[in-house]
Image (spheres, helix red, strand yellow):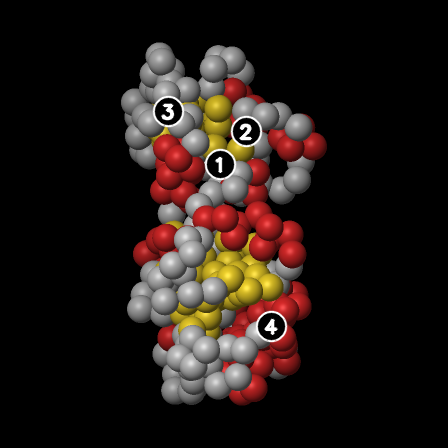
Amino acid sequence: MLTQIHHKKNELQEVKFFEDAECTVPFDFTEKKNLYILSKDGDITPLLEVIFKSINIAAYTPYIPNVKIIKDNPRIKTIKDITPNLSKYIPEDNAVLFLSDDDFQRYYRFFSKERRSLIQYRLLSKCNLKSGLNFTIFIPHGTQSEVEKANEVQKELKEKHGVEEVNLFAKDWFLPRCEKYYEEEPIPEWFEDFIKIYDEFFVENNIDNKDAFNKIITTNSTGILKLEDSKERLQVIDCKEIFEEYLKENNFYK
């Protein structure tokens, strides 16, 4: 069982742990092993404090920067530190297109032979794509550079290969919400295409979306996107769910 633990600091800046989000009920560490904890404003102190409560405790948190003291501790895990089975979140009728060999090698085994296809981008030009084949492009990080690359690939699939549906899966999301850019003038050129993706999710306007991703699938790991942001063309996955599935599949609950 993965148990969520909440925390706050008192007047002396000491970390205190609680059962509830309102931080009113002290946390009972008895027989607890796998804890789900969210950091606040990049503060890693609660993560370190919680694993010092017992040598049997492992702390799972969605995302933290590559801080050496955390990275070298085997009892603190982020989404980046595990290899979860993400196949359930990708439409079953989609071929999965990986943009790097590393991602292909890391995740391809989770997709059954019944799935239509698993393709690396460097091999795309050599593939005889089946008519009616849909795609989900897989990227590990929803950063500017990775999304720009994925956007180029989706345009190639639709314009060159006649693909009608291209979705995007990003394990972590780092791009700011679109309305921040609408407050600035001019809007950065690289962001103009991406606004087509975001407009239905955050901004009401009449931009045509036919040249953008049909759907974005990502997680709430960085806190930029929330579960309540999910809509028809945006799916935000709870990292706690991913951790729970990972622990079950790898028998960490035994």
Q: Disc 4 designates what residue?
A: 124
Distance from Cα at disc 1 to Cα at disc 4:
35 Å
* Image quadrant occupied by the C terminus: top left
Above/below status of 12 relative to 120: above
Give yes or no for contact between labels 2 and 1 (Cβ–Cβ under 8 Å). yes
Q: Amino acid at mark 4?
A: Leu
Residue 253 shows which numbered tag?
3
Number of other residues with Cα within 10 Å of mark 3, as a class: few under 14, some 14 to 19, many 20 or more: few
Distance from Cα at disc 4 to Cα at disc 3:
40 Å
Judged from the image, the secondary structure of the residue bearing numbered disc 3 is loop
Give yes or no for contact between labels 3 and 1 (Cβ–Cβ under 8 Å). no
Q: Nearer the viewer, residue 194 or 179?
A: 194
Distance from Cα at disc 4 to Cα at disc 2:
37 Å
Q: Amino acid at mark 3?
A: Tyr
Q: Amino acid at mark 1?
A: Thr
Give yes or no for contact between labels 4 and 2 (Cβ–Cβ under 8 Å). no
Q: Disc 2 designates what residue?
A: 76
